[in-house]
Amino acid sequence: MSRPLTLYLVAGEPSGDELGAALMRALRGEVPEIRFLGIGGPRMAREGLVSLFDMGELSVMGLAEVVPRIPALARRLRETVANVVAAAPDALVTIDSPGFCLRVAARVRARAPAIRTIHYVAPSVWAWRPGRARRMARFIDHVLALLPFEPAYMTVAGMTCEFVGHPAALAPVFTDAELAAFRARAGAEGEGPLLLIAPGSRAGEVRRLMPIFAETVARAAADLPGLRTVIPLVDGMEAEVELVAARISPGPLLVRPEEGDVARRTAFAAADAGLAKSGTVALELAAAGTPMLSAYRTSWTTAALLRRMLRVDTANLVNLVGGERVVPEFIQEDCAASRIVPALRHLLADAEARNAQRRAFERVVAALGGGGEPPSCRAARSVLKVLG
C-alpha cells in the first residue's frame, strides 16, 4: 500500500503561517488524504500541523536583530534539514522568510536531490539583490508568486513560477450595520474618526514603531476631537503592543487573535484611516478601501545597508504595484510623530486625498487577483501540478 502524498512545510513568521494554513486547507480539498509535516505557527497548528519547534524562534528581521541569534538559528537550521531528509517528503514547501527557508532548501537539495522544492512568496529580487534569483535556481524547482510582475524574474533565472494572487486582495464584504456595530464597540459611534494602528508582526518592528504611533495619536488628538483607535493584535505580540497602547487615551480597542480573521478584517473596513507598518498590511487596508499612511524604521546598521542595495524608491506595496506614490510614506528618519501628525490631519480632513487613494486601491486589488478565485486554491493546484 502506497503512502499518502506527504509535504513538508516551513513557515517562519505570522504572514507565512497564514499562507501555510490556507494552503493546507486548499490542498486537503484537492487531496483529502494528504499528510503534512514541518514548522508553522498557531494557524497551521489548527490545520493539524505538529511543528518541529516554535516558529517564533525564526521571526527576526534586520542585521542588528539577526546577528545575536545566529547560533540558535544555525542549530534550528541543522535540525530542520535533518528532519526533512529523514521524512523524505514528496516535496519541501518553504513559505516566505527567505533568510531561513532558502537555506533549508539549499541544504536539503544537497543532501536529498530527489525531494522537490517549492518556495511560496518570491523574494523581492526586483527591490534588492537581483542575483538571488539565479542562486535560488540551483535548489528551488518552482515558485508561487504573490505579485503579478514576479514570474518574469524567476523564470529568466531558471525556475518555473506561477502568479497565484495575493491573499490580502480578498476582502470580505460587511454590511453598514456590521460596520456601525464595530465602530460603536470602538467608541467611534459619533463623528470622531476611527484610526487603525498596525505596528507590525515582529518584536523589533513593534518596539520601534508602536511608541511613535502612540505619540502620533496623542499629538493628533488635540485637533481631532473624538479620535478613537483600534489595533488588531498579532499572535505573540500582544504583550508588546499592550504595554505601549496603555499610553493612548482613550484606550484603543484591541482586536485579539482568537477573535478570528472576520473581526480583524472588520476593523480594517470600519476604520476611517490606517497608520501602518510598510508591508502586507498595506494591501489589506487597500482591499478594505481604507486610506492610509505607512511608516517603517529599522536599526541604523540595517538601514545603511539597505540604502546601498535598494533598487526601488518605495516600501509600500500599494505604491509599488500601482506604480504611483499615492500612499504617503515615513521611512527611517522621517518616521517621527512630528512628521506623521500633519499628514494624518490632512488625510482625515481632505476627502479628495482619501478618494484618490481609494481609486488607486481598486486598480491594485484587481491586479493582485481580487474578485477571483482564492490564491490558496490556485497555489494548491500549482503545487500539485509540479508534483504531477
Image (cartoon, helix red, strand yellow):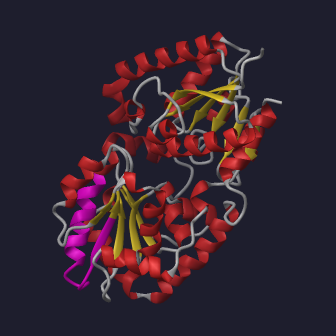
Front-most of residues 83 and 98: 83
Rendered position, 71 above or below 44: above
Magenta stretch: includes residue 216: yes
Position in image of residue 69 (x %, y %): 34, 26
Question: Which residue is painted at 45% across and 43% down in the image?
Answer: 14
Rendered position, 45 above or below 108: below
Q: Quadrant of residue 226?
A: bottom left
Say whether residue 351 is visible. Answer: yes
Q: Quadrant of residue 101?
A: top right
Magenta stretch: includes residue 368: no
Marker count (numbered): 0
Front-most of residues 117 and 373: 373
Q: Which residues are magenta?
A: 208-230
Question: Which residue is painted at 64% across and 10% down in the image?
Answer: 111
Relative to residue 99, is residue 84 drawn left or right? right
Position in image of residue 324 (x %, y %): 59, 69
Rendered position, 353 above or below 379: below
Say whether residue 299 is visible. Answer: no
Rendered position, 250 above or below 43: below
Relative to residue 388, is residue 264 drawn left or right? left
Question: Which residue is painted at 62% across and 17% down in the image?
Answer: 108
Relative to residue 218, is residue 49 drawn left or right? right
Quarter of the image with the N terminus is: top right
Q: Quadrant of residue 8?
A: top right
Position in image of residue 199 (x %, y %): 35, 56
Relative to residue 297, is residue 175 drawn left or right? right
Quarter of the image with the C terminus is: top right
Front-most of residues 208 and 329: 208
